Every structure is written in C-alpha cells, then in structure tokens.
Amino acid sequence: METIAFFNLKGGVGKTTSAVNIAWHAANDGIPTLLWDLDPQGAASWLLNKKAKNKTAPKKLLKGKTPIGDLVRETDYDNLDIIPSDFSLRHLDRQLALESEKDKQNLINKLVEPFGERYALVVLDCPPSFSVLTEQIFETADSLYIPIIPTHLSLRTFEQTREFFKQNKLKPKRLHAFFTMVDRRRSLHRVMLSHPPKMLKNGLTTPIPYAAVVEKMGDHQSPLPAFDQRSPVSRAYADLWAEIKQTLSEF
C-alpha cells in the first residue's frame, strides 16, 4: 500500500480539488483507493457527496475505542471509498498532541497501516497548517503533492514547507510541487512555467489550468472527470495522475 498526501499552507490553491480528482483517477485505473478527508472544513467529503455516519470522537478514535474502519463510506465510484470529515476533527490535533506525548507513537501512521489489507492507495487531504497532525502526516506519507499557483506568495509557502521538513529531519525529496490555477494570460504565470524555480526540481511538470468548469464540481458534487473528460483542465488532471503514478513504487 502507498500513502500519499495533498498539502499546502495556503488555502484556495486547488489542494482538495486535486486530491479528489487524483483519487478518482486512481480508482478508475482499478486501484482500490481510500481518500481520508482530514480537513475539518470537509470540502473533499462534500465534493464526493458523503457525510460522516456520526460525529468523530478524536479521543475514542486515537485510543482504539472507535475502529477507524467503521468511519469508511463507499462513494458512488468503483474502487473509491472515503473517510468523511466532520467539524469535530478540529479537536483531532489537540488530542493527537496529548496522546503522542504519552506513548511517542505516530498515531496517524498507526491508523492508516491496517488499510493495507483492503486498499492499494490511501490519499490524505490535509488541513492547511503546520501542527502535530500534519507533522504525523508528513512522516506517514510516502509522497506529498503540493499545489502551487504560479505566484511569489504561493511559492513562498512551498519554501516554508521545505524548511519545515529540513528542520524536522524529514526528507524534502518526498515533496512534489505542481502548478495549479495557471492563467497563461498572466506574464508571471508564463515566466514561472517556462523557468521553474530551482527549489521545484522534484516537482511535477503537468500544470493545471485555471478553468471555470472546476467550479461545477460543486454543482455536481462529484469529481471533474465523472462529468467532464474533454475540457483542458480535465485532461490535465488525467496527465497529472499519469505523472504521479510514475512517482509511486507499487504501480
């Protein structure tokens, strides 16, 4: 089983959109896939039209009193399941800090491990912050994918993430940035695409264009390729998945 995560310190950069569309493509390729929505905002859950069965009690989950398998829900798509988010997840980070201090374990990794019997790929949609939760996600994920708008401020968040990895003795090579919401009418976007900064040397080469059709994911509450496979942005996500697949060791 491979575990991948989509993360960015900055909101509104296409993190959740990318996580949902890549999870769909993996499942469509016949790969049993689980998407775990770890962002309390629950955008990935909403886009897949799935709500949590009950409110998650983080303390019970981390102590094993609530089996994590009980939180899994099937989606409307073959090979794709989800652990939906709910607002109670806002307490998960605080509880993780308390529990991890006691036994020094990576509890996120401990929760993910059993899914290897059922899934070949676990996709984690992360909250936009540095915290105990995201640090454990960073340690758990085999690869992390960082969507970046081609702007200086968005690039700065990637630089901050790389520095966080270095300071915490994590491997920055597991970070794979890719450009999203690309508008080729903007000169800065064109410059960054044609001359990517050196810090993006491990990045993916497929840019995701800005397109209004992405907003229709909210209208349909479904992944983009489930209702549109011809638009440039939909084809770009298909190409991005093909590129991501090459970075994974099991596929």
Image: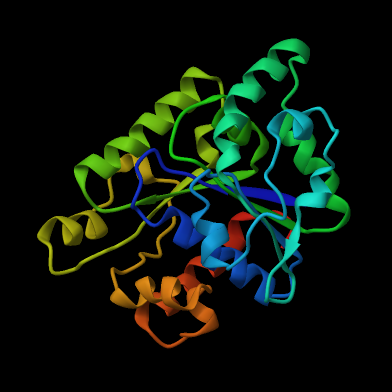
Q: Residue at x 85, y 33 (%)?
A: 65
Quadrant of the image containing the C terminus = bottom right
Percent x, y for residue 190?
18, 62
Q: In x, y percent, where is residue 226?
A: 55, 81
Residue drawn at the location 73% of the way across and 29% of the way down: 107
Q: Residue shown at 58%/67% (left/top)?
A: 48
Observer able to see residue 243: no
Extreme residue toward the bottom, this view: 230
Name the spot of residue 219 as percent of width and height, x first.
Answer: 42, 76
Q: Nearer the viewer, residue 184 or 98?
A: 98
**Residue extending farthest top:** 102
Q: Is 227 left, or right, of 26 in this rendering?
A: left
Of the pair 149 and 176, the residue shown nearer to us: 149
Q: Relative to 95, is 219 above or below? A: below
Identify which residue is drawn at 28% across, 44% down: 154
Residue 104: which quarter of the image?
Answer: top right
- 169 is higher (above) or lower (below) than 50: above
Left or right, 250 with respect to 177, comes to: right
To which quarter of the image does residue 106 belong? Answer: top right
Residue furthest to the front in view is 54
Q: Is residue 228 above or below residue 176?
A: below
